[in-house]
Amino acid sequence: MARLIRVCLCVISFWLVHIVIDLVKPRNLCEKFIQYESLLDTCQLQYGYNGTIGRQFRPPFDFMTSLNLHRMKLANESYNAKDTDFTFVMAASRNHFEQSMDAVASIQENFPDNRIVYFDWNLSKLQREQMTKWCNVELRDFDMKLLPTYHEYAHKIPRYQSMKIQAVALVLVETPYVIWADASVRFLKSDLRPQIALAKQNGDLVFFTRTEIHSTFAVTDPNTYEFLPTDLSQQQRPIHVQSTSFMLINTPEVFHNVIWWWLICSLDKSCIAPNENTHCFPNTAINNMTEYLGCHRCDQSVVNVLVSNWFNFNQSRYFLSEVERPLIKIERFKSMKLAVKQCEDQEFASHPPDSYIGTR
């Protein structure tokens, strides 16, 4: 009996030591990760809201460091951004390539001096060749098979949605001024001053579209709240913004409150995509604000929780309503109203920087 007790104690001690090591290791890696540019004041691995602390994240810091994500640029809080300072970031798979051509053309038409970083999410060889002479477009490889969570996904859409913030973060290594655009986004005008003013006044993050047909609560799997606690009653209000397009100035404040948590959540499938059913259709049989629809919007669900928590559920601080003359519209097809501009002396496509995923 005494021998059995000693064996049991040894086993328990072994597991306790490993539990402690597992708890300390992510924090040590985090300290190493953030020390380069002092992105964070302290190593934060658990998100907190109103005294409630979420589950601890275990980010793949070695992977993140290999992509130079510890070198993300931070904007000075007294920045004076102009329209031309922003880099447009987008990505598409081969079945959304033609749709994305209209997005590129609308950016070229309205922002001819801005560069466009376009991530290849499994384009065909022919599609890549088409892009080599697109004016101001820099094609980046993104080998998603290298992502630590790649094989955890059964479906493509939630995997793509989780990668959006990763693409943005890769460009933040080069510039703190970024505008994300889905393939369905069409820019209608060239004046970003209202959005820049709202960003500077509040929190350096502005979304361009929203929906009032459902709440964040209705389209967010409850498991995400284990990592990102929030006020569930407030999440049942009609304040859901869409992540199809947004402006981001990466100041320390927006990094600490949104970007950091969005990024490490995206690298943990149980946070970003605990439910791979992304088909969130309004249900006339139930209340689409106060009842859960059984689906999950992945990146959109996560960023809505983060920004609404940060801005105390005041949507006017991170969304600019422009009813009469909006900045963008959404078209989930190729209209061919504008042609992509071609440049023979294209400078961007052949000179990608070091921070990208994979090579071809």
Image (cartoon, rainbow, N blue to C red):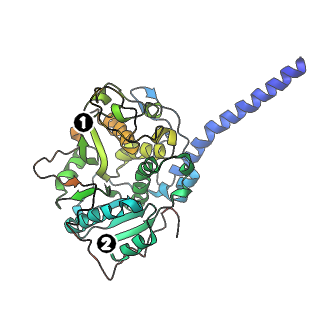
Residue type, numbered disc 1? Ile
Using the image, determine if residue 16 lies above or below residue 68: above
Of residues 313 and 154, the one nearer the viewer is: 154
Query: Crowding near pointer 1: few (<14 within 10 Å), some, many (20+)?
Result: some
Q: Quadrant of residue 285?
A: top left
- The spot of residue 157 in percent (x, y) is 43, 49
Q: Residue at x 28, y 42 (%)?
A: 241
Of residues 272 and 230, the one nearer the viewer is: 272
Find the residue positioned furthest to the top: 1
Residue type, numbered disc 2? Asn
Q: Is residue 80 visible?
A: no
Look at the image and tell me in which quarter the N terminus lies.
top right
- The spot of residue 130 in percent (x, y) is 37, 74
- The spot of residue 64 in percent (x, y) is 53, 53
Using the image, determine if residue 28 lies above or below residue 68: above
Q: Of the numbered discs in the image, which one, if any, rests on residue 136?
A: 2
Query: Crowding near pointer 2: few (<14 within 10 Å), some, many (20+)?
Result: many
Secondary structure type for disc 2? loop
Secondary structure type for disc 1? loop
Q: Quadrant of residue 105?
A: bottom left
- The spot of residue 355 in percent (x, y) is 48, 63
Q: Tell me the residue that label 1 is attached to.
A: 213
Using the image, determine if residue 335 lies above or below residue 204: below
Q: Earlier in the sequence, mark 1 or mark 2?
A: 2
Find the residue positioned furthest to the bottom: 344
Spatial separation of the CA atoms under disc 1 and disc 2: 37 Å
Using the image, determine if residue 301 lies above or below residue 139: above
Q: Residue at x 23, y 40 (%)?
A: 317
Q: Are marks 1 and 2 in contact (CB under 8 Å)?
A: no
Find the residue positioned furthest to the front: 285
Q: Is residue 181 visible?
A: yes
Q: Residue at x 41, y 51 (%)?
A: 165
